[in-house]
Image (cartoon, helix red, strand yellow):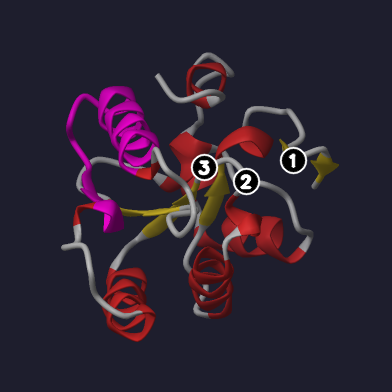
Amino acid sequence: MARGVGMVAAAGVVTEELLDSRIRKRSEKKGRILDIKFCFKKGTVIYLAGSITGVADYKERFARAEFAVRSLFDGQVKVWNPAKLPAGKSKRWYMRRCLQMVLGCDAVYAQRCWWLSGGACVEIALARYCGIPVVQEDVAAGGKEVCDGVVN
């Protein structure tokens, strides 16, 4: 299971009143990290954002994140995994498809150290600009991200 996901699942039950869109907007304006259960309901389409370029084991990392999200919701969510796109294309080709996926999803799941990836930064910025909820893997679990000695 991806680091952090299990801790979020054990954090507690989210009541129906938290699903009220006014509360969601208020939480986003205050910069709070949205609870994973709050964003991801049955039938939700989730886009996985994270580092790919320059990461040797990116396919395994994305597979673990996909498995963790599917497991948390008993397979009741659809996960869009950019690591499954064919290899050998240009950055422009990938970003064109990934940004279309972001615009078509209900929520974005930002993997650990997403901010080290230029592409993931663009995807998350687009999601936030469009009001698509973004959940950060480690931060949502109550921790801080530490990537290459830098704390985010």
**Marks 2 & 1, CB-CB < 8 Å contact:** yes
Question: Could you tell me if the residues under marks 3 and 1 are in contact, i.e. CB atoms within 8 Å?
Answer: no
Seen in the picture, residue 9 relative to 65 is either above or below; the reply is above
Q: Do the residues labelled 3 and 2 touch (CB within 8 Å)?
A: no
Q: In this view, does 98 lie to the left or right of 2?
A: left
Q: Earlier in the sequence, mark 3 or mark 2?
A: 3
Tell me the residue that label 1 is attached to. Answer: 148
* Relative depth, front residue between 121 and 31: 121
* In the image, residue 61 above or below residue 29: above
Crowding near pointer 3: few (<14 within 10 Å), some, many (20+)?
few
Per the image, the residue denoted by label 3 is: 17
> Which residue corresponds to the image point at 50% horizontal and 70% vertical from the top-left?
119
Q: Decide: is 19 above or below 97.
A: above
Range of magenta residues: 59-83
Residue 94 is a magenta residue: no
**Mark sitting earlier along the chain (2/1):** 2
Which quarter shows the N terminus? top left
Residue 77 position within the rendered picture, expressed as x and y whole percent measured from the top left: 22, 42
The x, y position of residue 75, in whole percent, is 17, 31
Question: Which residue is depicted at the point 34% across and 61% down?
Answer: 106
Q: Nearer the viewer, residue 139 or 21?
A: 139
- What type is the residue that disc 3 sits on? Glu
Q: Residue 38: x percent and y percent?
A: 48, 42
Label 2 sits on residue = 113
- Label 2 Cα crowd, 10 Å radius (few <14 / some 14-19 / many 20+): many
Q: Give the label, 3 or 2, closer to the camera.
A: 2
Residue 62 horizontal side relative to residue 32, left or right: left
Measured in 3D between alpha carbons, the distance from the residue under mark 2 to the one under mark 1, in whole angstroms, is 9 Å
> Which one is in front in this view, the residue at disc 3 or the one at disc 1?
1
In terms of secondary structure, where does tag 3 sit?
helix
